[in-house]
Image: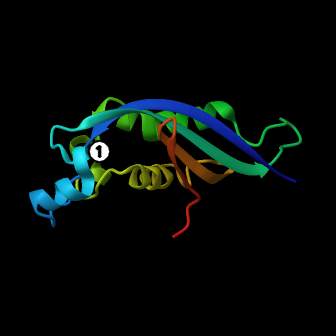
Amino acid sequence: MTVYLTRKCEFSASHHYFNPAFSEEENRRTFGKCANLNGHGHNYTLEVTVKGEVDATTGFVVDLKELKEIMNREVVDAMDHRYLNHEVAEFKEQIPTTENIAIAIWKRLEGKLRVARLHRVRLFEMHDLWVDFYGEA
């Protein structure tokens, strides 16, 4: 039987929305105050859900220490207290929307677990705004 397990972590980062193909006015109209080149920040909450069979000898779906270490290395260490547009490679050419950040996190985590499989990345930008990504192409 498949079991789903979710681990949560938090990180803080700043960003701004800006499409270089748009004029400054078009960026302001499209992205509003988020187009401010000085940026703004969020305290993100990340939930990573993995799925797998329960190991008969350990009772685990995944080694929780391993999952935490991977999440810290691939996400928290890379994104916490960073200006995403300038300091995180994925966002040098891509707008760091919550949607794009969730996809980037999926790509950073995918294939890193030894046993369980990545099922969902849920990223909260605020308590009333979040994105779920299930790895669909």
Tell me residue 71's x, y (percent): 52, 38
Question: Which residue lies under the disc numbered 1?
Answer: 88
Q: Is residue 115 visible?
A: no
Q: Is residue 11 visible?
A: yes
> What kind of residue is marked 1?
Val
Residue at left offset 51%, top offset 45%: 130
Q: Quadrant of residue 57?
A: top right
**For the residue carrying disc 1, how many other residues have a C-alpha within 10 Å: few (<14), some (14-19), or many (20+)?**
few
Q: Quadrant of residue 58?
A: top right
Q: Is residue 120 left or right of residue 3?
A: left
Tell me residue 105's x, y (percent): 46, 49
Q: Quadrant of residue 41?
A: top left
Q: Nearer the viewer, residue 49 or 115?
A: 49
Tell me residue 1's x, y (percent): 87, 54
Residue 76 higher or lower than 49, as above or below: above
Residue 124 higher or lower than 11, as above or below: below
Disc 1 secondary structure class = loop
Residue at left offset 23%, top offset 44%: 33
Residue at left offset 76%, top offset 51%: 52
Residue 41 higher or lower than 123, as above or below: above
Q: Is residue 1 left or right of residue 104?
A: right
